[in-house]
Amino acid sequence: MENHEPKSGIFKRYRELTTSNKIAVWGVFAASICAITAIISVLDSPAPGNNHKVANENLNQTSKPSQKLLNRLLEQLDRKDVDISERDKIIEEWIKKYKELEQRLSQRAPDEKLALQAREQLANGNLDKAEELLQRSLEQNLKIAYEQNKKAAADAYELGSIKELKIEYREAQKYYLKATQLAPNNTLYLNDYGSILHDLGEYKKAIEFYEKALKSNINTFGKDHPKVAIRWNNIGAAWQALGEYKKAIEFFDLALKNNINTFGKDHPKVAIRWNNIGAAWKALGEHKKAIKFFDLALNSDINTFSKDHPKVAIRWKNIGMAWRALGEYKKAIEFYEMSLKVFRARLGDGHPSTKTVMDNLELVRMEMK
Protein backbone atom coordinates (compact mmCIF):
# COMPACT_ATOMS: atom_id res chain seq x y z
CA MET A 1 0.00 0.00 0.00
CA GLU A 2 1.27 3.43 -0.89
CA ASN A 3 2.12 5.69 2.09
CA HIS A 4 0.60 9.17 2.08
CA GLU A 5 2.22 12.10 3.83
CA PRO A 6 -0.15 13.96 6.19
CA LYS A 7 -1.24 17.29 4.69
CA SER A 8 -1.41 19.12 8.01
CA GLY A 9 1.61 21.26 8.81
CA ILE A 10 1.31 20.29 12.46
CA PHE A 11 1.77 16.58 11.83
CA LYS A 12 4.49 17.17 9.29
CA ARG A 13 6.49 19.17 11.82
CA TYR A 14 5.79 16.51 14.43
CA ARG A 15 7.23 13.74 12.20
CA GLU A 16 10.39 15.75 11.69
CA LEU A 17 11.08 16.01 15.45
CA THR A 18 13.55 13.84 17.31
CA THR A 19 12.26 11.30 19.80
CA SER A 20 13.18 13.49 22.76
CA ASN A 21 11.40 16.47 21.22
CA LYS A 22 8.34 14.35 20.50
CA ILE A 23 8.23 13.40 24.17
CA ALA A 24 8.47 17.11 25.05
CA VAL A 25 5.58 17.95 22.70
CA TRP A 26 3.39 15.28 24.27
CA GLY A 27 4.33 16.72 27.63
CA VAL A 28 3.18 20.21 26.55
CA PHE A 29 -0.03 18.75 25.12
CA ALA A 30 -0.73 16.88 28.36
CA ALA A 31 0.05 20.01 30.37
CA SER A 32 -2.39 22.02 28.23
CA ILE A 33 -5.14 19.44 28.77
CA CYS A 34 -4.46 19.57 32.52
CA ALA A 35 -4.57 23.37 32.41
CA ILE A 36 -7.89 23.33 30.56
CA THR A 37 -9.33 20.85 33.07
CA ALA A 38 -8.11 22.95 35.96
CA ILE A 39 -9.54 26.14 34.44
CA ILE A 40 -12.90 24.50 33.85
CA SER A 41 -12.89 23.35 37.48
CA VAL A 42 -12.13 26.87 38.66
CA LEU A 43 -14.87 28.37 36.47
CA ASP A 44 -17.33 25.71 37.64
CA SER A 45 -16.60 26.22 41.32
CA PRO A 46 -18.58 28.82 43.30
CA ALA A 47 -16.74 32.07 43.81
CA PRO A 48 -15.92 33.00 47.43
CA GLY A 49 -17.97 35.81 48.82
CA ASN A 50 -20.93 37.50 47.14
CA ASN A 51 -19.17 39.25 44.25
CA HIS A 52 -20.48 38.08 40.86
CA LYS A 53 -22.43 35.32 42.61
CA VAL A 54 -25.32 35.42 40.12
CA ALA A 55 -22.99 35.45 37.14
CA ASN A 56 -21.08 32.43 38.44
CA GLU A 57 -24.28 30.53 39.17
CA ASN A 58 -25.51 31.17 35.62
CA LEU A 59 -22.20 30.07 34.15
CA ASN A 60 -22.30 26.90 36.23
CA GLN A 61 -25.58 25.99 34.56
CA THR A 62 -23.84 25.70 31.19
CA SER A 63 -22.04 22.57 30.00
CA LYS A 64 -18.30 22.16 29.68
CA PRO A 65 -16.71 22.59 26.24
CA SER A 66 -16.49 19.29 24.37
CA GLN A 67 -13.14 17.59 23.92
CA LYS A 68 -13.52 18.22 20.19
CA LEU A 69 -13.57 21.97 20.76
CA LEU A 70 -10.69 21.85 23.23
CA ASN A 71 -8.57 19.91 20.74
CA ARG A 72 -9.43 22.46 18.05
CA LEU A 73 -8.35 25.27 20.37
CA LEU A 74 -5.03 23.59 21.09
CA GLU A 75 -4.39 23.06 17.40
CA GLN A 76 -5.04 26.75 16.72
CA LEU A 77 -2.67 27.77 19.50
CA ASP A 78 -0.06 25.47 18.02
CA ARG A 79 -0.50 26.88 14.52
CA LYS A 80 -0.08 30.39 15.88
CA ASP A 81 3.02 29.38 17.86
CA VAL A 82 1.58 30.84 21.06
CA ASP A 83 4.09 30.86 23.89
CA ILE A 84 3.36 28.27 26.57
CA SER A 85 3.46 30.93 29.26
CA GLU A 86 0.53 32.69 27.59
CA ARG A 87 -1.57 29.61 26.86
CA ASP A 88 -3.18 29.25 30.28
CA LYS A 89 -4.52 32.79 30.16
CA ILE A 90 -5.82 32.38 26.58
CA ILE A 91 -7.47 29.04 27.38
CA GLU A 92 -9.08 30.47 30.52
CA GLU A 93 -10.52 33.43 28.56
CA TRP A 94 -11.69 31.12 25.75
CA ILE A 95 -13.59 28.82 28.14
CA LYS A 96 -15.17 31.82 29.83
CA LYS A 97 -16.39 33.18 26.48
CA TYR A 98 -17.67 29.75 25.50
CA LYS A 99 -19.73 29.47 28.69
CA GLU A 100 -21.08 33.02 28.32
CA LEU A 101 -22.12 32.31 24.72
CA GLU A 102 -23.84 29.05 25.64
CA GLN A 103 -25.58 30.78 28.53
CA ARG A 104 -26.92 33.55 26.31
CA LEU A 105 -28.13 31.06 23.70
CA SER A 106 -29.87 28.99 26.36
CA GLN A 107 -31.83 32.08 27.43
CA ARG A 108 -33.30 32.73 23.99
CA ALA A 109 -37.08 32.48 23.63
CA PRO A 110 -38.62 29.09 22.79
CA ASP A 111 -39.70 30.32 19.34
CA GLU A 112 -36.09 31.21 18.44
CA LYS A 113 -35.49 27.71 17.16
CA LEU A 114 -32.39 28.43 15.10
CA ALA A 115 -30.58 30.05 18.04
CA LEU A 116 -31.48 27.11 20.30
CA GLN A 117 -30.30 24.66 17.65
CA ALA A 118 -27.05 26.64 17.49
CA ARG A 119 -26.64 26.10 21.21
CA GLU A 120 -26.99 22.32 20.72
CA GLN A 121 -24.37 22.39 17.98
CA LEU A 122 -22.07 24.41 20.21
CA ALA A 123 -22.47 21.84 22.98
CA ASN A 124 -21.64 19.11 20.43
CA GLY A 125 -18.44 20.91 19.52
CA ASN A 126 -19.60 21.99 16.05
CA LEU A 127 -18.74 25.69 15.82
CA ASP A 128 -19.21 25.83 12.05
CA LYS A 129 -22.74 24.47 12.21
CA ALA A 130 -23.56 26.81 15.13
CA GLU A 131 -22.29 29.72 13.06
CA GLU A 132 -24.40 28.67 10.07
CA LEU A 133 -27.56 28.45 12.21
CA LEU A 134 -26.95 31.83 13.82
CA GLN A 135 -26.36 33.37 10.38
CA ARG A 136 -29.76 32.07 9.26
CA SER A 137 -31.31 33.38 12.47
CA LEU A 138 -29.76 36.80 11.84
CA GLU A 139 -31.12 36.95 8.29
CA GLN A 140 -34.62 36.01 9.47
CA ASN A 141 -34.60 38.58 12.27
CA LEU A 142 -33.26 41.31 9.99
CA LYS A 143 -36.11 40.63 7.58
CA ILE A 144 -38.65 40.82 10.42
CA ALA A 145 -37.05 44.01 11.74
CA TYR A 146 -37.16 45.54 8.25
CA GLU A 147 -40.87 44.77 7.89
CA GLN A 148 -41.58 46.12 11.36
CA ASN A 149 -39.59 49.29 10.63
CA LYS A 150 -41.43 49.67 7.33
CA LYS A 151 -44.81 49.56 9.08
CA ALA A 152 -43.66 51.88 11.87
CA ALA A 153 -42.28 54.34 9.28
CA ALA A 154 -45.64 54.37 7.48
CA ASP A 155 -47.41 55.08 10.79
CA ALA A 156 -45.01 57.94 11.57
CA TYR A 157 -45.48 59.40 8.10
CA GLU A 158 -49.29 59.29 8.34
CA LEU A 159 -49.15 60.93 11.78
CA GLY A 160 -47.02 63.66 10.22
CA SER A 161 -49.66 64.12 7.52
CA ILE A 162 -52.39 64.46 10.16
CA LYS A 163 -50.34 67.04 12.06
CA GLU A 164 -49.81 68.93 8.81
CA LEU A 165 -53.56 68.92 8.15
CA LYS A 166 -54.02 70.34 11.66
CA ILE A 167 -51.48 73.10 10.78
CA GLU A 168 -49.19 71.78 13.53
CA TYR A 169 -46.03 71.94 11.47
CA ARG A 170 -43.50 71.43 14.26
CA GLU A 171 -45.25 68.26 15.34
CA ALA A 172 -45.50 67.15 11.70
CA GLN A 173 -41.77 67.70 11.36
CA LYS A 174 -41.06 65.31 14.25
CA TYR A 175 -43.13 62.53 12.73
CA TYR A 176 -41.73 63.02 9.24
CA LEU A 177 -38.21 62.88 10.68
CA LYS A 178 -39.05 59.64 12.48
CA ALA A 179 -40.33 58.18 9.19
CA THR A 180 -37.05 59.03 7.45
CA GLN A 181 -35.08 57.44 10.29
CA LEU A 182 -37.07 54.21 10.12
CA ALA A 183 -37.05 54.07 6.30
CA PRO A 184 -33.99 56.12 5.20
CA ASN A 185 -34.33 55.21 1.51
CA ASN A 186 -38.01 56.09 1.10
CA THR A 187 -38.06 59.01 -1.35
CA LEU A 188 -41.56 60.14 -0.38
CA TYR A 189 -40.60 60.47 3.29
CA LEU A 190 -37.34 62.25 2.47
CA ASN A 191 -39.01 64.71 0.12
CA ASP A 192 -41.93 65.51 2.42
CA TYR A 193 -39.62 66.00 5.40
CA GLY A 194 -37.66 68.43 3.22
CA SER A 195 -40.93 70.12 2.27
CA ILE A 196 -42.03 70.65 5.88
CA LEU A 197 -38.56 72.04 6.69
CA HIS A 198 -38.98 74.37 3.70
CA ASP A 199 -42.36 75.55 5.04
CA LEU A 200 -40.74 76.18 8.44
CA GLY A 201 -38.02 78.32 6.84
CA GLU A 202 -35.21 75.80 7.43
CA TYR A 203 -34.08 76.00 3.82
CA LYS A 204 -30.56 74.58 4.06
CA LYS A 205 -31.77 71.57 5.98
CA ALA A 206 -34.59 71.20 3.45
CA ILE A 207 -32.01 71.10 0.65
CA GLU A 208 -30.17 68.30 2.48
CA PHE A 209 -33.27 66.07 2.41
CA TYR A 210 -34.35 67.14 -1.08
CA GLU A 211 -30.89 66.02 -2.25
CA LYS A 212 -31.29 62.65 -0.50
CA ALA A 213 -34.64 62.20 -2.24
CA LEU A 214 -33.01 63.22 -5.56
CA LYS A 215 -30.20 60.70 -5.14
CA SER A 216 -32.68 57.94 -4.32
CA ASN A 217 -34.80 58.73 -7.40
CA ILE A 218 -31.78 58.86 -9.72
CA ASN A 219 -30.60 55.49 -8.39
CA THR A 220 -34.07 54.02 -8.92
CA PHE A 221 -35.25 55.66 -12.16
CA GLY A 222 -32.27 57.40 -13.77
CA LYS A 223 -31.91 61.13 -14.48
CA ASP A 224 -34.60 61.29 -17.18
CA HIS A 225 -37.56 60.42 -14.95
CA PRO A 226 -40.23 63.06 -14.14
CA LYS A 227 -39.80 62.46 -10.40
CA VAL A 228 -36.16 63.52 -10.70
CA ALA A 229 -37.37 66.82 -12.23
CA ILE A 230 -39.57 67.42 -9.19
CA ARG A 231 -36.58 66.94 -6.86
CA TRP A 232 -34.45 69.37 -8.90
CA ASN A 233 -37.28 71.89 -8.87
CA ASN A 234 -37.65 71.60 -5.08
CA ILE A 235 -33.94 72.16 -4.55
CA GLY A 236 -34.14 75.20 -6.81
CA ALA A 237 -37.08 76.58 -4.82
CA ALA A 238 -35.13 76.22 -1.56
CA TRP A 239 -32.10 78.03 -3.04
CA GLN A 240 -34.45 80.74 -4.29
CA ALA A 241 -35.89 81.13 -0.78
CA LEU A 242 -32.31 81.62 0.46
CA GLY A 243 -31.78 84.39 -2.11
CA GLU A 244 -29.34 82.23 -4.09
CA TYR A 245 -31.08 82.93 -7.40
CA LYS A 246 -28.36 81.73 -9.76
CA LYS A 247 -28.18 78.41 -7.95
CA ALA A 248 -31.96 78.26 -8.13
CA ILE A 249 -31.86 78.84 -11.91
CA GLU A 250 -29.31 76.02 -12.27
CA PHE A 251 -31.70 73.50 -10.70
CA PHE A 252 -34.82 74.92 -12.37
CA ASP A 253 -33.04 74.51 -15.71
CA LEU A 254 -32.24 70.85 -14.96
CA ALA A 255 -35.91 70.27 -14.13
CA LEU A 256 -36.97 72.09 -17.30
CA LYS A 257 -34.78 70.02 -19.62
CA ASN A 258 -35.96 66.82 -17.99
CA ASN A 259 -39.63 67.74 -18.45
CA ILE A 260 -39.20 68.88 -22.06
CA ASN A 261 -37.56 65.54 -22.88
CA THR A 262 -40.42 63.69 -21.19
CA PHE A 263 -43.50 65.76 -22.07
CA GLY A 264 -42.57 68.15 -24.87
CA LYS A 265 -42.82 71.96 -24.67
CA ASP A 266 -46.61 72.23 -24.44
CA HIS A 267 -47.11 70.71 -21.02
CA PRO A 268 -48.19 72.34 -17.72
CA LYS A 269 -45.07 71.15 -15.89
CA VAL A 270 -42.83 72.69 -18.55
CA ALA A 271 -44.72 75.97 -18.23
CA ILE A 272 -44.14 75.91 -14.46
CA ARG A 273 -40.39 75.39 -14.96
CA TRP A 274 -40.19 78.33 -17.42
CA ASN A 275 -42.18 80.49 -15.00
CA ASN A 276 -39.87 79.58 -12.09
CA ILE A 277 -36.78 80.51 -14.10
CA GLY A 278 -38.43 83.79 -15.06
CA ALA A 279 -39.20 84.57 -11.41
CA ALA A 280 -35.58 83.92 -10.45
CA TRP A 281 -34.28 86.24 -13.20
CA LYS A 282 -36.78 88.89 -12.09
CA ALA A 283 -35.48 88.60 -8.50
CA LEU A 284 -31.98 89.23 -9.90
CA GLY A 285 -33.24 92.38 -11.59
CA GLU A 286 -32.86 90.82 -15.05
CA HIS A 287 -36.40 91.77 -16.13
CA LYS A 288 -35.96 91.29 -19.90
CA LYS A 289 -34.67 87.76 -19.30
CA ALA A 290 -37.60 87.22 -16.96
CA ILE A 291 -40.07 88.33 -19.67
CA LYS A 292 -38.50 85.86 -22.12
CA PHE A 293 -39.22 82.91 -19.78
CA PHE A 294 -42.62 84.24 -18.66
CA ASP A 295 -43.56 84.47 -22.35
CA LEU A 296 -42.48 80.86 -22.97
CA ALA A 297 -44.64 79.76 -20.03
CA LEU A 298 -47.55 81.83 -21.38
CA ASN A 299 -47.43 80.29 -24.85
CA SER A 300 -47.19 76.77 -23.43
CA ASP A 301 -50.23 77.30 -21.20
CA ILE A 302 -52.25 78.88 -24.04
CA ASN A 303 -51.54 75.81 -26.17
CA THR A 304 -52.54 73.53 -23.28
CA PHE A 305 -55.51 75.37 -21.71
CA SER A 306 -56.59 78.22 -24.09
CA LYS A 307 -56.48 81.98 -23.39
CA ASP A 308 -59.34 82.15 -20.87
CA HIS A 309 -57.72 79.88 -18.26
CA PRO A 310 -56.61 81.22 -14.84
CA LYS A 311 -53.08 79.83 -15.40
CA VAL A 312 -52.79 81.98 -18.52
CA ALA A 313 -53.99 84.96 -16.49
CA ILE A 314 -51.13 84.33 -14.03
CA ARG A 315 -48.60 84.39 -16.87
CA TRP A 316 -50.01 87.70 -18.20
CA LYS A 317 -49.85 89.17 -14.71
CA ASN A 318 -46.17 88.12 -14.32
CA ILE A 319 -45.23 89.68 -17.66
CA GLY A 320 -47.06 92.85 -16.62
CA MET A 321 -45.04 93.00 -13.40
CA ALA A 322 -41.76 92.69 -15.32
CA TRP A 323 -42.69 95.46 -17.76
CA ARG A 324 -43.68 97.64 -14.82
CA ALA A 325 -40.27 97.04 -13.19
CA LEU A 326 -38.67 98.23 -16.45
CA GLY A 327 -40.78 101.39 -16.38
CA GLU A 328 -42.73 100.29 -19.47
CA TYR A 329 -46.09 101.19 -17.93
CA LYS A 330 -48.21 101.00 -21.09
CA LYS A 331 -47.03 97.47 -21.77
CA ALA A 332 -47.56 96.60 -18.11
CA ILE A 333 -51.16 97.89 -18.27
CA GLU A 334 -51.79 95.90 -21.45
CA PHE A 335 -50.85 92.59 -19.77
CA TYR A 336 -52.53 93.45 -16.47
CA GLU A 337 -55.79 94.16 -18.29
CA MET A 338 -55.67 90.83 -20.14
CA SER A 339 -55.02 89.08 -16.84
CA LEU A 340 -57.81 90.95 -15.06
CA LYS A 341 -60.33 90.09 -17.78
CA VAL A 342 -59.76 86.34 -17.31
CA PHE A 343 -59.71 86.48 -13.50
CA ARG A 344 -63.00 88.42 -13.44
CA ALA A 345 -64.65 86.02 -15.87
CA ARG A 346 -63.46 82.86 -14.15
CA LEU A 347 -63.08 83.80 -10.49
CA GLY A 348 -65.12 86.96 -9.92
CA ASP A 349 -64.22 90.39 -8.53
CA GLY A 350 -64.00 89.14 -4.94
CA HIS A 351 -61.22 86.60 -5.55
CA PRO A 352 -57.74 87.47 -4.16
CA SER A 353 -56.10 86.98 -7.58
CA THR A 354 -58.55 89.42 -9.17
CA LYS A 355 -58.01 91.96 -6.40
CA THR A 356 -54.23 91.71 -6.73
CA VAL A 357 -54.31 92.54 -10.44
CA MET A 358 -56.77 95.40 -9.84
CA ASP A 359 -54.42 96.86 -7.22
CA ASN A 360 -51.44 96.50 -9.56
CA LEU A 361 -53.29 98.30 -12.34
CA GLU A 362 -54.17 101.16 -10.04
CA LEU A 363 -50.54 101.51 -8.91
CA VAL A 364 -49.21 101.53 -12.49
CA ARG A 365 -51.68 104.23 -13.51
CA MET A 366 -50.61 106.30 -10.51
CA GLU A 367 -46.93 105.84 -11.45
CA MET A 368 -47.64 107.06 -15.00
CA LYS A 369 -48.95 110.40 -13.77
Image (spheres, rainbow, N blue to C red):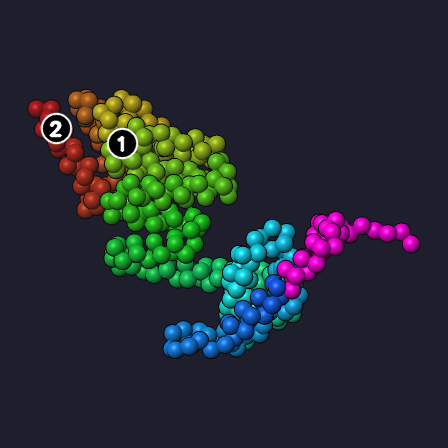
Q: Quadrant of residue 246?
A: top left
Question: Is 200 placed above or below 22 here?
Answer: above
Q: Position of residue 201 (x, y in %)?
A: 24, 44
Taking the view exactly as shown, the residue that stands out farthest to the left is: 369
Left/right placement of residue 259 relative to residue 279 reads: right
- Quarter of the figure that contains the C terminus: top left
Left/right placement of residue 254 relative to residue 202 reads: right
Q: Amino acid at mark 2?
A: Arg
**Label 2 packing within 10 angstroms: few (<14), some (14-19), many (20+):** few
Label 1 belongs to which residue?
Answer: 244
Q: Amino acid at mark 1?
A: Glu
Tell whether position 330 is magenta.
no
> Magenta residues?
1-30
Q: Position of residue 212 (x, y in %)?
A: 40, 43
Question: Which residue is at the front of the view, 30 or 289?
Answer: 30
Residue 341 visible in rendering: no
Question: Which residue is at the front of the view, 358 or 319?
Answer: 319
